[in-house]
Amino acid sequence: MTQILIVEDNGEYAGDMAEFLVELNHEVTIATTAGEMWAALTKTPAAVVVLDLGLPDEDGFNVIPRMRQLYPEIGLLVLTGRVAFDNRILGLRLGADHYLTKPIKFPELAAHIEALDRRVRPHEPIAMPSKWTLRVSARQLELMGTVIDLTEKECNFLHLLTINTRPVPRQVIVAGMGGDDPDASRRVDMLVYRLRKKARSGLGQDLPLRSAYGEGYSLSAGFTLS
């Protein structure tokens, strides 16, 4: 069973879609506006969001990067009537996992949802004691009793990676550091460079930070939050 949030202003179409998915034993919630979507996400967790771009209160292209920033763990499937190739490229670059166009047969849509859910569903971590501790409120990183101070951005970066089981997309990190700044991507690179250097110098060990080409950043060791 997958928890699905359908965001579609055509109520009849959303209802038909939901009815089909419920028959496949999925749990489905419907929102007809972006406002209803944000409210629903604060109340009920969703594994996959099916997003129509033509919402009455907010353009879907504005929703995608915000969704990626606030809920990077959610699978995001765009289902829209905007068939232009440039729109498809833009949607994927902004952070959509899949970009599908209407009309679509519901069995095909269900197959995409189920494949996406399998990919984004977090795996159960192996219970192992962690040597690394991130003290969020104090903005400190500890390794086996040795502590270094972090800047606010360094701490936020590590916290974002700690709470996600998948690599955090670069665009999500850039958005958190000021996505409108043309130098934001370069500043992410500098932040990572300084953080690696700080950990090596202050803690005597390389930071377990992995750069996944085309995916983003992730941690290769467990961190404890305090």
Image (cartoon, rainbow, N blue to C red):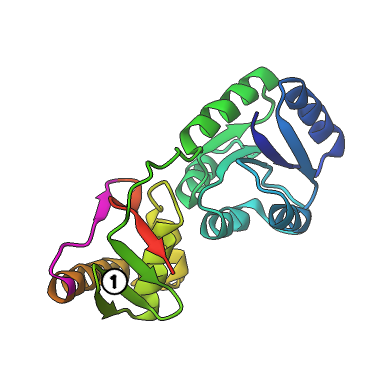
Viewer-proximal residue among 8 and 133: 133
Viewer-proximal residue among 90 and 224: 224
Residue 182 visible in the snapshot: no
Q: Give the image quarter of residue 159.
A: bottom left
Q: Quadrant of the N terminus?
A: top right
Q: Residue at x 45, y 72 (%)?
A: 178
* Amino acid type at image mark 1: Glu
Q: Residue at x 75, y 58 (%)?
A: 39
Residue 37 visible in the snapshot: yes
Relative height, residue 199 to residue 125 (above, below): below
The residue tagged 1 is 142
Q: Residue at x 17, y 76 (%)?
A: 202
Where does residue 17 sit, x and y in percent of width and height?
Answer: 76, 28
Q: Quick one: which residue is furthest to the right in this view?
A: 12
Where does residue 81 sit, x and y in percent of width and height?
Answer: 68, 36
Q: Residues within 10 Å of mark 1 (few under 14, many from 20)?
A: some
Q: Give the image quarter of residue 7.
A: top right
Residue 174 is left or right of residue 150, and the answer is right
Relative height, residue 125 to residue 62 (above, below): above
Q: Residue at x 12, y 69 (%)?
A: 204
Question: Judging from the image, what secondary structure is the residue with disc 1 in?
Answer: strand
Residue 17 is left or right of residue 64, and the answer is right
Relative height, residue 81 to residue 197 (above, below): above
What is the span of residues highlighted in magenta in the rendered image?
203-213
